[in-house]
Amino acid sequence: MNIIKRNSWFNFLHLLFILKLAITSRALNGSSSSCANSFNCGSTINGIGYPFRGFSDPPYCGHPKLVLNCNYQKNLTSIEIVGLKYRVLAIEQTTQTMTIAREDIMEDTCPTEMKNTTLDYSTFDFAAVYLNITFLYGCPPHVGGSFVKDSNYSVPCGTNGEGVYIKGGNQGPGICNNSVIVPAPVPPEGATQLPNITELDRIMRQGFLVRWKIGSQMCSNCTASKGQCGYNNATNKTACYCIDSDTPYISNTCPLSDGTSPPLPKGNDTSPAILIILE
């Protein structure tokens, strides 16, 4: 009787292992085919791969904070950072830098989203030195003399032509209703005031340079071993999808040319991993 129970238990475990293997094989093969295409949008943003992914790509193809969206009618690329939409003007994967500009200043004189330009510093950092410019909205008609003195000028913004004050540096709203901070290039040495609004618009629309912090070494090792880079949302780390072996699995790198497999990181389960693919 005990032998029968042991055999039944063994058969059950064997069935689970076979099922796990089948799911893994299907998932990893699906991952490779769906993540193999690079992101392309217009003539300037082309051939962009991991850690980025396209908006319509599966989540496991790229880092969740590096999702690119293409307006194919206008050939414009955008990315969302801390709830604010930015236009992507350039991406240099070799230096891990990206030039972005607030979407709301690309067509308007002043920002229309009442949000400061804030990076997610766990993922990005500024890659150059910038001067913060503050736009002040809803200021009283007759503000104090010192306020006017410290302000460079007031410009009409929006459909109602509201007067918006512009000041250098980080300024809170103070006696005004709202303030929005936008980075701009540091003025030339000796400059005593900000450029006029036409010039300020031009330089702000040129964007600012940021660097992403997602390391590239693991992905380089993965692609060198003929694997496909992706993102493991369970571990929040880069994953290497290995599908050219008899037993597809996730690792740091794929099987070596002599047929041997590289060691898995310590603490990892050596059995094939299961990816859940939502279709």
Image (spheres, rainbow, N blue to C red):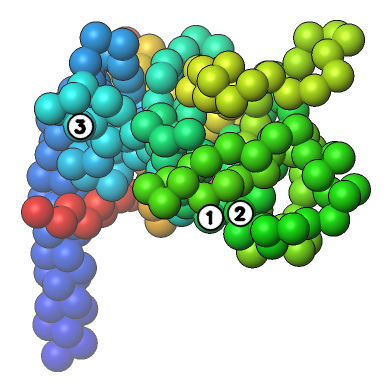
Q: Amino acid at mark 3?
A: Asn
Which numbered marker is on residue 137? 2
Residue visible at 13% across and 39% down?
Answer: 30
Q: Amino acid at mark 2?
A: Tyr
Give the side of residue 96 with respect to residue 151, left or right: left
Residue furthest front in the image: 142
Q: Amino acid at mark 1?
A: Met
User: How far across and how far down the image is residue 202, in percent?
Assistant: 51, 18
| Residue 246 shows up from this direction | no
Residue furthest bottom in the image: 1
Q: Which mark sits nearer the N-terminus, 3 or 2?
A: 3
Contact flag, marks 1 and 2 (Cβ < 8 Å) = yes
Classify the position of the C terminus by image quarter: bottom left
Q: Which mark sits nearer the N-terminus, 1 or 3?
A: 3
Q: How many marks?
A: 3
Which numbered marker is on residue 114? 1
Quadrant of residue 212 within the rendered picture? top right
Q: Secondary structure at mark 1?
A: loop
| Residue 92 shows up from this direction | yes
Which numbered marker is on residue 20? none
User: How far across and how far down the image is residue 86, in percent?
Assistant: 43, 36
Would you place residue 97 above or below residue 143 in this image? above
Classify the position of the N terminus by image quarter: bottom left
Q: Secondary structure at mark 3?
A: strand
Q: Nearer the viewer, mark 1 or mark 2?
A: 2
Q: CA distance from mark 3 to mark 2?
A: 30 Å
